[in-house]
C-alpha cells in the first residue's frame, strides 16, 4: 500500500490515538505512517460490540423472567463467560453457576457480593439492586 | 523518577516494546527486523481454540515466540520474571528494577488499559508495553500501539498485569541483561527466513501455513449456511479483526514483513530481497482488499452467500500467492 492511500477514516480510535501502518513512500521505500482508522475496521469492531450487547440483552431477559441473577447482566457487560468470571472471582465454575441463579444469588454472603462487585467495578448496592430496563 | 526513554510507536506491541528497550541500551534494531528474524509471519486456523466463542485464526505465532526466537538468533539475553498470585511482589520488583534505571517490558490485559479508546477494550491478555518511570504513584507508560506516551496508576497497572483468563500474564516482566557487542545480522536473517518458509509451506497439518488459509477458505464458504447470517457475520468480522486490530501494521503483519525484506536487502546487499518485498506488498494489498470486502459482507449481516464465496475465492488466490512467494524465497536462502 502507498503512503498517500493509507485510510484516514475516523472511528474506533475515537480521536484518542492514531495507529501505525506500514506503507511505501514515493521512492518505494517502507515507512511507518499513522492512520486515524479505516472504515472496514470500524464495521467489524462495531459488530463485535453488537454481539456483546446481544449477550447483555439476553441476560436481561432471563433476569426479568426470574431465571437469572444480576450477576449474569454484569458478566455479559464485562464480556465474560463463566470460565473467565470464575477466574476473576477465584471461585469454582459450579459455584459461579449457582450464583447466576436467583436462588443462589440470594444466599450470597456480604463478602462474596463485595468480591463480585469489585470485579465488575461497581458498588455492592448497584449489584444487589440491579433491575434490567 | 522518569527515565530518558524514547517512545517509539510501532505496528505490533511485542516487537515494538523489544525494539525500544534495545534502543535504550544502545542497539538499533527496527521492529520489522526483529519480526523477520523471529519468523513472525504465519497463518494458523485453530478451531479448537475459541475467542469470544469463535474459532481462532491467527496471522502470527503464539505471543512471546517471535521475540524468543529473535533473541536466540541474535544472542540477546533477557531477564524474565513471572509472579503467580503475587501482585504486590510483582509491583515491588518492577519498582526496584526502575530504580536501577532500567525500563521494563510488561505483559498486560488490554481490557484493563484505561488509556485505550473504549472500542479497543476486549479481553486479550498478551499485550506488551514498557514502564519507564514512576512519579507520585503514577507509572510512565510507553505503549507502542499508542501515538504518545501515557500513564497508569499503581492500581490500574497491577490490575492489567494480573488480568485473568487465557494467556494471563501473571505479572510477567522482562528486560535485556546482555546484548552482544558485535551483531551479525546476516545469519540471523537467513535463519528467520528459513523458518518462516518452512512454517508456511511444510507443516504436515492442514491448519497451518498456506494449507491453513485454503482450509479456512472452505469453512468460510459454509458459514452462512451452517451458522446462519448473524453468527456467520460475527465469525467473518473476527477474522478481519485478527488481520487489522490493535497492532498488525496492516494486512495481518504482511506489510511489516515487506518492510523487513527491504531492510534485509540492504543488510544482505542483495537486490532480490527488495524485489520480493514488492511481491509481499501486493500480497498485503490483497489481504486489505479481503478485509474491505469481508467488512462489506458482514455489514448488515446479510445472508447472501455470494459475499462469503467472493472472500473465500480471494483467500484461495492469496494462498496461491503466498505459496509461490515462499517457494521463491526458500530457494534464495538455501
Image (cartoon, coloured by chain):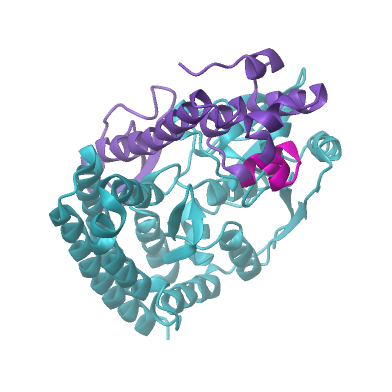
Chain colours: A purple, B cyan
Q: In this view, does B114 lie above or below B256?
A: above
Nearer to me, B6 or B221:
B221
Percent across and percent down for residue A53 are 41, 30
Nearer to me, A4 or B63:
B63
Report whether B110 appears left or right of B257.
right
Residue B117 can be seen in this image: no
Residue under the image location 23 percent in, 42 percent down: B301
Number of marks in the image?
Answer: 0
Percent across and percent down for residue B19 are 57, 49
Residue under the image location 38 percent in, 46 percent down: B241
Please state, as top left, top right, bottom left or bottom right, where the N terminus of chain B lies in the image: top right
Report whether B5 appears left or right of B80.
left
Residue A84 shown in magenta: yes
Residue B314 can be seen in this image: yes
- Magenta span: chief secondary structure: helix
Residue under the image location 23 percent in, 39 percent down: B299
Report whether B256 appears left or right of B271.
right
Q: Is residue B64 above or below residue B91?
A: below
Residue under the image location 82 percent in, 44 percent down: B85
Residue A123 figure quarter: top right
Q: In this view, does A59 lie above or below B311?
A: above
Residue B97 shown in magenta: no
Nearer to me, A61 or B261:
A61
Percent across and percent down for residue B18 are 60, 50
Please state, as top left, top right, bottom left or bottom right, where the C terminus of chain B lies in the image: bottom left
Which residues are drawn in magenta? A83-97
Percent across and percent down for residue B6 are 59, 35
Amino acid at each position: 500500500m502507498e503512503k498517500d492511500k493509507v485510510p484516514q477514516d475516523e472511528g474506533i480510535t475515537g480521536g484518542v490515538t492514531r495507529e501505525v501502518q506500514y506503507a511505501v513512500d514515493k521512492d518505494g521505500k517502507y515507512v511507518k505512517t499513522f492512520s486515524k482508522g479505516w472504515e472496514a475496521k470500524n464495521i467489524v469492531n462495531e459488530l463485535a460490540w453488537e454481539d456483546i450487547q446481544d449477550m447483555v440483552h439476553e441476560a436481561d431477559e432471563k433476569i426479568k423472567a426470574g431465571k437469572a441473577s444480576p450477576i449474569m447482566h454484569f458478566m455479559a457487560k464485562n464480556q465474560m463467560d463463566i470460565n473467565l468470571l470464575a477466574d476473576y472471582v477465584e471461585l469454582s465454575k459450579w459455584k459461579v453457576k449457582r450464583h447466576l441463579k436467583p436462588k443462589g444469588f440470594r444466599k450470597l454472603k456480604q463478602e462474596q457480593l463485595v468480591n463480585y462487585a469489585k470485579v465488575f467495578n461497581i458498588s455492592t448496592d448497584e449489584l444487589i439492586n440491579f433491575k434490567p430496563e | 523518577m522518569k527515565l530518558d526513554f524514547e517512545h517509539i510507536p510501532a505496528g505490533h506491541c511485542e516487537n515494538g516494546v523489544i525494539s525500544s528497550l534495545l534502543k535504550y541500551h544502545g542497539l538499533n534494531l527496527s521492529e520489522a527486523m526483529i519480526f523477520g528474524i523471529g519468523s513472525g509471519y504465519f497463518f494458523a486456523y485453530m478451531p479448537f481454540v475459541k475467542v469470544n466463542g469463535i474459532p481462532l485464526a491467527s496471522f502470527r505465532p503464539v505471543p512471546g515466540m517471535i521475540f524468543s526466537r529473535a533473541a536466540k538468533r541474535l544472542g540477546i539475553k533477557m531477564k524474565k520474571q513471572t509472579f503467580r498470585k503475587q501482585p504486590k511482589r510483582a509491583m515491588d520488583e518492577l519498582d526496584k528494577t526502575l530504580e536501577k534505571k532500567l525500563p521494563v517490558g510488561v505483559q498486560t490485559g488490554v481490557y484493563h488499559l484505561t488509556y485505550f479508546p473504549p472500542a479497543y477494550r476486549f479481553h486479550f491478555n498478551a499485550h506488551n508495553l514498557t514502564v519507564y518511570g514512576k512519579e507520585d504513584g503514577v507509572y510512565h507508560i510507553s505503549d507502542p500501539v499508542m501515538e504518545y506516551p501515557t500513564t497508569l496508576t499503581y492500581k490500574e497497572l497491577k490490575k492489567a498485569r494480573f488480568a485473568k483468563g487465557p494467556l494471563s500474564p501473571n505479572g510477567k516482566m522482562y528486560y535485556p541483561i546482555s546484548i552482544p557487542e558485535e551483531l551479525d545480522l546476516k545469519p540471523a536473517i537467513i535463519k528467520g527466513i528459513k523458518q518462516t518458509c518452512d512454517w508456511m509451506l511444510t507443516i504436515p497439518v492442514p491448519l497451518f501455513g498456506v494449507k491453513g488459509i485454503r482450509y479456512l477458505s472452505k469453512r468460510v464458504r459454509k458459514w452462512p449456511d451452517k451458522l446462519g447470517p448473524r453468527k456467520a457475520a460475527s465469525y467473518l468480522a473476527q477474522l478481519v479483526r485478527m488481520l487489522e486490530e490493535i497492532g498488525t501494521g496492516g494486512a495481518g503483519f504482511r506489510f511489516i514483513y515487506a518492510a523487513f525484506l527491504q531492510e534485509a536487502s540492504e543488510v544482505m546487499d542483495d537486490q532480490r530481497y527488495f524485489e520480493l518485498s514488492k511481491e509481499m506488498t501486493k500480497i498485503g494489498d490483497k489481504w486489505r482488499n479481503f478485509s474491505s470486502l469481508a467488512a462489506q459482507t458482514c455489514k448488515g449481516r446479510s445472508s447472501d452467500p455470494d459475499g462469503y464465496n467472493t472472500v473465500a475465492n480471494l483467500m484461495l488466490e492469496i494462498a496461491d500467492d503466498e505459496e509461490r512467494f515462499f517457494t521463491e524465497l526458500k530457494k534464495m536462502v538455501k
